[in-house]
Image: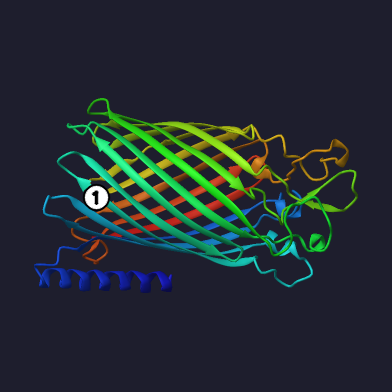
Amino acid sequence: MKKIVITVAALVMFLNVAKAQTDSTNHRKLKVDEVNFVTSYYHQDGNNSAVTGGIGSEKLDDFGNSFDLQLSRFDKKDNKHTLGVELGIDVYSSASSDKIDPSTISSASSKDVRISPSLNYLIENAKNNISMGGGVSFSQEYDYTSIGANVVFAKASKDKNREFSAKASVFLDTWAVILPIELRHVNTNFNYKQGDNAPRNSYNLALGLTQVINQRLQVSLLTDIGYQTGLLGTAYQRVYFGDNGDNAYSEKLPDNRFKLPVGVRANYFLGDKFILRGFYRYYTDSWNLTAHTAELEIPYKITPFISVAPFYRFYSQSGVDYFKPYKEHMLSDNSEFYTSDYDLSKLTSHMVGANFRMVSAYGLFGVKKLNVFELRYSYYNRSTDLTSHLITLALKFK
């Protein structure tokens, strides 16, 4: 909590300095629009760790923080230019990662820090209702490095009741291959050796069409087409075969995957106090995994400035043919691909929670520039006996 207070104080000081600099020089067009700070704590537990072949602790803790700065200016043609700078820092610990090398007191990836800066630029033409831009991103942790880039485009109708949006992105990732300790000096049919660098590249195209039906109803159609290639399995996740004693293999999965999710989102305004927000998505991919997601959120305005939004999400998936639990794979089956990762198994899950939000143009809790305060909690339960808790605090300064 002390770290959060210090960070918030630093944000307020930064905003005061930035505004003073902007106001003191009339020719300086670039100004601070807003600053967003998000901090979260995530905890999960379960007994189906993929690191130990589908059995063992899945306990994980993650403390995440992100800082987002939005700067803007208007050019001579009254186009708005927005520069977004974001920095994310996650600190996490994983009990299962210690099992990569049980002989050590703590393996290198059992505790790690992920740093992920990004930079985005957007141009909005109010006259033609067109927005376009792009961005770059970077992410690094102990065994993983990612470089990303994206371009975005959006076009709204003249009356702004309809909008089409598109975002194309690419992520060029590199894994530092870490094998289970007992497989590092053994010849197996795995394609990589300990210490190798392996690629994992992702290409995505997100499309959206939003339509205002009437004063109460707004509907959006969404899809996010994806293609991955490279090392898509995780080298240190073990698979045990029933006819191979206690000897393990590294998880092996196809080196490409095509993903196709299609969704619909609808917002319905029930008077001045209630909103119904519904979402449904169907997912399928080239690994023969299919999934359904349904979500309902009901924001309620307690006052014009305070609202609470309970929500519920249901998810189910079919599982992939490559998955089998601990020691249910057989070498005699001569399977090319195999995994005991329960993320790829047949499962259902439920998530329930609530979001509390306060908004004020005049400041909150005695902080003049703090105009949005959000606190969100969710509880997650999966049919594989995995459970998790997530609490998130979001602050917006303007």
User: Seen in the image, is 396 located left or right of residue 376?
Assistant: left
For the N terminus, the image quarter is bottom left
Asked whether 326 or 115 is in front, the reply is 115
Q: Residue 317 falls in which quadrant of the image? A: top right
For the C terminus, the image quarter is bottom left
Rendered residue at 27%/72% (across/down): 14
Q: Position of residue 242 (x, y in %)?
A: 87, 43
Rendered residue at 88%/53% (across/down): 246
> Where is mark 1, residue-wise?
123
Question: Residue pushed farthest left?
Answer: 26
Asked whether 304 or 276 is in front, the reply is 276
Structural crowding at the residue carrying mark 1, measured as other residues with C-alpha within 10 Å and reported as few (<14), some (14–19) or many (≥20): many
Mark count: 1
Position above or below: 360 against 203:
below
Q: Residue 58 falls in which quadrant of the image? A: bottom right
Q: Position of residue 368 (x, y in %)?
A: 21, 65
Task: Give the amino acid at mark 1.
Answer: Ile
Rendered residue at 28%/51% (across/down): 122
User: Seen in the image, is 309 located left or right of residue 50?
Assistant: left
